[in-house]
Image (cartoon, grey):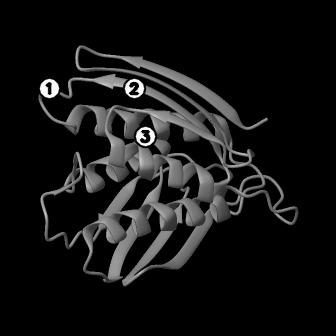
Amino acid sequence: MRTASIQRETAETSILLSLNIDGEGKTDIQTGVGFFDHMLTHIGKHALCDLTVKAKGDLHIDCHHTVEDTGIVLGQALKEALGTKEGINRYGHVILPMEEALILCAIDFSGRPYVEIDTPFTADRVGDFDTEMTEEFFRAVCIHAGINMHIQVLKGKNNHHIIEGMCKAFAKAMMQAVSINPRVKGVPSTKGMLEV
């Protein structure tokens, strides 16, 4: 079973996250940030990962610590659940439409984190979520999971649609990358390992 449960406690947040990569897309998300809950639900649903997140953070300040720390824990869970990454496709990519928005996402579970994100937002917030936290969330996930990721917004006007499209595109690309390919023998790297 490719699963992980991570608990992280700081002076700013308390997060308990469980992940089953080979799940059915079942989610139970409670972060106190409604729009962020909605986005995490999309990630679980469209990656077909079972994902549970219970997060409490200093929301009286803003959503920054809650969102970023959840990204850290999700990245740690992905890394733990994948283990040596034997048999995975490693790469995943998608061009995903979301209403008027069109999002490109390409990822590589290389073990060497790198993040390039195009975020052309025209509003500071969507609901109770700061739009600038979109990049912070993905950066935290990628750094702690060891993912090289590029996201480009090819088209888009509505900030809700853009962020939702980014989350769905990430989910679909991730599902492709972590899927087991019976033709892959061992680790898909000439190095023989997918770590730094």
Q: Position of residue 123 (x, y in %)?
A: 13, 65
Which residue sits at x=30%, y=67%? 117
Residue annotated with mark 1: 60
Disc 1/disc 2 C-alpha distance (Å): 14 Å
Point out which mark residue 44 bears: none
Q: Earlier in the sequence, mark 1 or mark 3?
A: 1
Q: Nearer the viewer, residue 10 or 149?
A: 10
Amino acid type assigned to the residue bearing label 2 in the image: Ala
For the point 36% across and 52% down, which residue is it?
Answer: 138
Quadrant in which residue 30 is drawn: top left
Q: Quadrant of the N terminus?
A: top right
Determine whether, in the image, residue 43 is placed left or right of residue 161: right
Label 2 element class? strand
Dots 1, 2 in contact, CB < 8 A: no
Marks 3/2: CA distance?
Answer: 18 Å
**Structural crowding at the residue carrying mark 3, measured as other residues with C-alpha within 10 Å and reported as few (<14), some (14–19) or many (≥20):** many
Upstream in sequence: badge 3 or badge 2: 2
Residue that label 3 marks: 144
Q: Are marks 3 and 2 in contact (CB under 8 Å)?
A: no
Residue 9: quarter of image: top left
Q: Along the horizontal axis of the image, is 79 left or right of 21?
A: left
**In the rendered structure, which amino acid carries the disc numbered 1?**
His
Q: Is residue 190 visible?
A: no
- In the picture of the structure, the residue carrying the numbered disc 2 is 55
Looking at the picture, which amino acid does disc 3 mark?
His
Label 1 crowding class (10 Å Cα cut-off): few <14, some 14-19, many 20+?
Answer: few
Q: Relative to 164, is 80 above or below? A: above
